[in-house]
Amino acid sequence: MVARVAWFVALGGLLGGYFMAAHEVSRALVGGFDASAGTVTIALIGAAVAGLPLVALLPIALMPGWWWSRRLPAIRAEHGQCPGCGYLTGRFPCPECGGQGRVPSQELFTRAGVMRFVILCAGCLVVGVVLAEWRIHRDEIAFLAEVNAQHAAGQTRLARPRAGWGSFASLRWDVAEGFSAPPPFEDPRIPGWRAAGRPASDRRN
Ligand SMILES: [Zn+2]
């Protein structure tokens, strides 16, 4: 039982971390500084879609429960032991645990097991998204402080990569245009690159 709970917690940590990373990537792709609820929702859908391949983890997730509650009792029964407790007995109810000696079915994909996994994934998605939003918010607060410092020093624009998994996109500030966090594909990161028809003197950084 302790092993199964530990497995559940470890799996939850893994899934929570995955969804946190997925949401940070999704948010950076969508873009937006101090994002609205709509932007967060679109990014959340992206993170949820990124969770679909996790179905491949289902057999691994169900394995420990299958072993302890279905396979192990069957092995015990094959050796003449009580399926429930392993007591060597030929008669039931078992004098040790009172079990009736029934061996459960050996299927891996039970309805309860699959439901538990789906609920775990949904819970981890929520926790991951909340964690990601907290980290993004903290990063934007830090950027605000950096801008204040740069502004005080006479700078009129500032840009740097986002923190965390969204570091392929950037946070920007311009004294005329204010704060922005454009989607990465609209962001000229290649040195010397500029949109067609845009004069070289207009190039940022
Ligand atoms: Zn027993």
Image (spheres, rainbow, N blue to C red):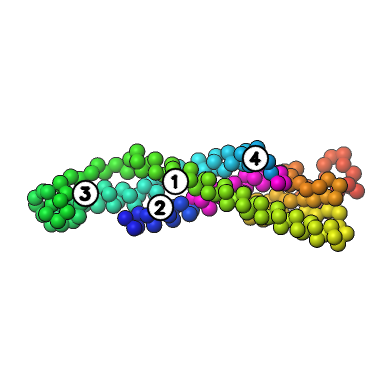
Residue contact between numbered discs 1 and 2, judged by CB atoms under 8 Å: yes
Residue 74's disc number? 3
The secondary structure that most of the magenta stretch takes on is helix
Amino acid type indicated by mark 3 = Ala
Label 3: state its secondary structure: helix
Q: CA distance from mark 3 to mark 1?
A: 28 Å
Amino acid type indicated by mark 2 = Phe
Residue 8's disc number? 2
The residue closer to the viewer here, 134 or 31, is 134
Mark 3, other Cα within 10 Å: few <14 / some 14–19 / many ≥20: many
Task: Answer yes or no: disc 3 within 8 Å of ligand 1.
Answer: no
Q: CA distance from mark 2 to mark 4?
A: 31 Å
Image: magenta residue range? 15-34
Q: Nearer the viewer, mark 3 or mark 2?
A: 2
Mark 3 vs mark 2: which is more N-terminal? 2
Label 4: state its secondary structure: helix
Mark 1, other Cα within 10 Å: few <14 / some 14–19 / many ≥20: some
Mark 2 vs mark 4: which is more N-terminal? 2
